[in-house]
Amino acid sequence: MSVLILALVAGAVIGLALGALGGGGSVLAVPVLIYLLGFSPAAATTAGLIIVTATSATALSAHARDGNVVWKTGALFALAGVAPAFLAGAVAGYLPATLLTGAFAVLAALAAVRMLRPAVAGPPERVRPAKAAVSGAGLGAVTGLLGVGGGFLAVPALVGVLGLRMKQAVGTSLLVITVNSLAALTARTGTGGDLRWEVIAPFTGAAILGAWDGKRLAAKITGETLQRIFAYVLLGVAALMLADVIV
């Protein structure tokens, strides 16, 4: 299979997950870029941020039109994560490849486990700035260091900690992902190595189109079913990456 076809297929799948679940798809972008498309870990995490930023912004516009974005909560999350995302993004380019790969594998496994135990919405409550700030800062650091959007962490936090409904959490998480990814990408300017735009451009285009389809898919299939399918895929990816690091 050619590199272009691989990039298009992978981009469509990742966009589908982002559009349907508000996160999770970006966790697959980095291993796909490394193992299928030949990127180094540093270049893959930077390329992943480019793909995630563009795709999340597109999906955000669709969810915003449907009124599923809670802007105040999302802004608190996003602003708290900007500085950590920027700092972690600046450091990531200097870390050993094996460390980045191992950390990413652990994160993917944790994301899969979290998806298999979906957050349950609590009673509606007013936005608590302290909770939003702490959660947002942690999310920003993860985004900057590993080149992932972090929606699989943001959605449970928005539902379980701040009491948003699932549809609101999915839409709002896309705002947080977009801002954090853009901050981390800014910090990585000039440190991403060979980004190979001939691969990134079609990958991103397919992901953007997939995000629109993902939003429609979410209306037809329950979020729990989608999360379970994706979680098992993530567990397999995490196992392969850990094996690569150990061996």
Image (spheres, rainbow, N blue to C red):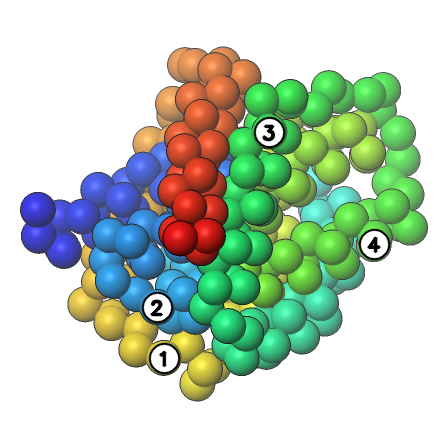
Counting residues from the N terminus, which is met first, the one under dot 4 or under dot 3? 3
Residue 43 makes an appearance in the image: yes
| Proximity of marks 4 and 3: CB atoms separated by less than 8 Å | no
* Amino acid at pointer 1: Gly
Q: Nearer the viewer, mark 4 or mark 3?
A: 3
- Which residue is depicted at the point 41% across and 59% down? 48
| Proximity of marks 1 and 3: CB atoms separated by less than 8 Å | no
* Amino acid at pointer 4: Ala
Estimate how packed mark 2 is, as few (under 14), some (14 to 19) or many (20 or more) residues with alpha carbons within 10 Å: some
Residue 65 makes an appearance in the image: no
Q: Nearer the viewer, mark 2 or mark 4?
A: 2
| Secondary structure at numbered mark 3 | helix
44 over 126 or under it: above or below: below
| Secondary structure at numbered mark 1 | loop
Say left or right for 222 vs 236: right
The numbered mark at residue 193 is 1
Q: CA distance from mark 3 to mark 2?
A: 27 Å
* Amino acid at pointer 2: Ser
Q: Nearer the viewer, mark 1 or mark 4?
A: 1
Counting residues from the N terminus, which is met first, the one under dot 1 or under dot 2? 2
| Proximity of marks 1 and 2: CB atoms separated by less than 8 Å | yes
Residue 236 pos. (x, y %) = 41, 33
| Residue named by callout 2 | 40
Residue 172 pos. (x, y %) = 64, 41
Q: Nearer the viewer, mark 1 or mark 2?
A: 2
Q: CA distance from mark 1 to mark 4?
A: 32 Å
The numbered mark at residue 133 is 4
96 over 117 or under it: above or below: below
Residue 202 pos. (x, y %) = 21, 57
In this rendered view, identify the residue nearer to me: 215 or 86: 86
| Residue named by callout 3 | 113
